[in-house]
């Protein structure tokens, strides 16, 4: 089932702004952060990361999808 698959985004370049303030933690623009999202929300999350000034440098499957199952 596609809805149960998760992917991990590696993101760089996030800057502190109104959107990142909602995340509840300060952002260091020099560090990579990792965000795990379900398959069904991938596009929405990409748009949110772009609005926050971030750049996705890697996307990798998590869990069973990473092991080639499903």
Image (cartoon, helix red, strand yellow):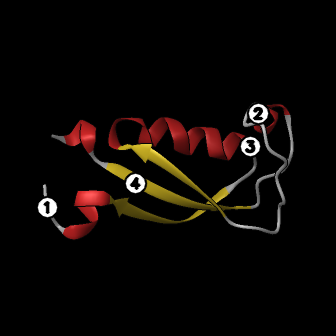
Q: Quadrant of residue 42?
A: top left
Q: Is residue 9 left or right of residue 41?
A: right
**Do tag 3 and tag 2 residues touch (Cβ < 8 Å)?**
yes
Closest to the observer, 52 or 66: 66
Element at label 2: helix
- Give the mark, 3 or 1, whose residue is nearer the N terminus: 3
Whole-angstrom CA distance, mark 1 to mark 4, is: 14 Å
Element at label 3: loop
Whole-angstrom CA distance, mark 3 to mark 1, is: 33 Å
Q: Is residue 25 left or right of residue 59?
A: right
- Give the mark, 4 or 3, whose residue is nearer the N terminus: 4
Mark 3 = which residue? 52
Q: Quadrant of residue 23?
A: top right
Mark 2 = which residue? 19
Crowding at mark 2 (Cα within 10 Å: few <14, some 14-19, many 20+): some
Mark 4 = which residue? 7
At a point 75% along the width and 49% down the height, the residue shown is 53
């Amino acid at each position: 089932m596609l809805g149960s698959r998760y992917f991990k985004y590696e993101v760089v370049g996030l800057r502190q702004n109104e959107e990142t303030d909602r995340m509840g933690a300060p952002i260091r623009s020099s560090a990579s952060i990792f965000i795990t999202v379900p398959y069904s929300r991938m596009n929405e999350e990409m748009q949110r990361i772009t609005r926050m000034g971030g750049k996705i440098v890697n996307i990798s499957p998590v869990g069973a999808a990473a092991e080639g199952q499903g």
